[in-house]
Image (cartoon, rainbow, N blue to C red):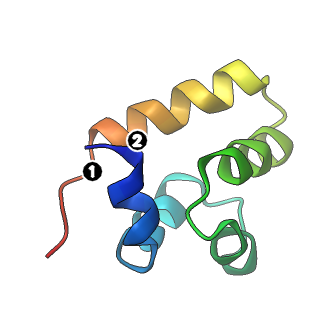
Amino acid sequence: MNWSTIETGWTSYKANAKQRWSRLSDEQIDGTMGKREQLTSRVQQAYAVSQEEAARQISDWQSKQKEKR
């Protein structure tokens, strides 16, 4: 699934993101508005990982998402 689908339907995907990155608050998840760069930054900060590792985690999560209707 491409990221633009996730971004435009963020309200449908953010619960899955919260489940994957439970250290992020609802406000932090909501605040990304589905922007990949912002999510990467928040994951990086919350989990003390490199930008590359945060991006890898997000890519892995993205590949597991199913299109919401």
- Residue at point 44% right, 73% down? 15
User: 45 left or right of 23?
Assistant: right
User: Which residue position holds label 1?
Assistant: 65
Seen at 18% across and 55% down, the residue is 66
Q: Is residue 21 left or right of residue 1?
A: right
- State left or right for residue 29 relative to residue 56: right
Q: Secondary structure at mark 2?
A: helix
| Residue 66 against residue 11 in the figure, above or below | above
**Which residue is under mark 2?**
61
Residue type indicated by callout 2: Trp
Q: Residue furthest left?
A: 69
Looking at the image, residue 36 sits to the left or right of residue 3; the answer is: right
Q: Quick one: quadrant of the N terminus?
A: top left
Indicate the secondary structure of the residue bearing disc 1: loop
- Amino acid residing under circle 1: Gln
Badge 1 crowding class, 10 Å Cα cut-off, few under 14, some 14 to 19, many 20 or more, is: some
Q: CA distance from mark 2 to mark 1?
A: 7 Å
Query: Mark 1 and mark 2 in contact (Cβ < 8 Å)?
Result: yes
Q: Callout 2: few (<14), some (14-19), or many (20+) C-alpha neighbours within 10 Å?
A: few
Q: Is residue 17 above or below residue 10?
A: above
Quadrant where the C terminus sits is bottom left
Image location of residue 9, percent across then percent down: 37, 72
Which residue is at a point 86% across and 44% down the rendered structure image? 45
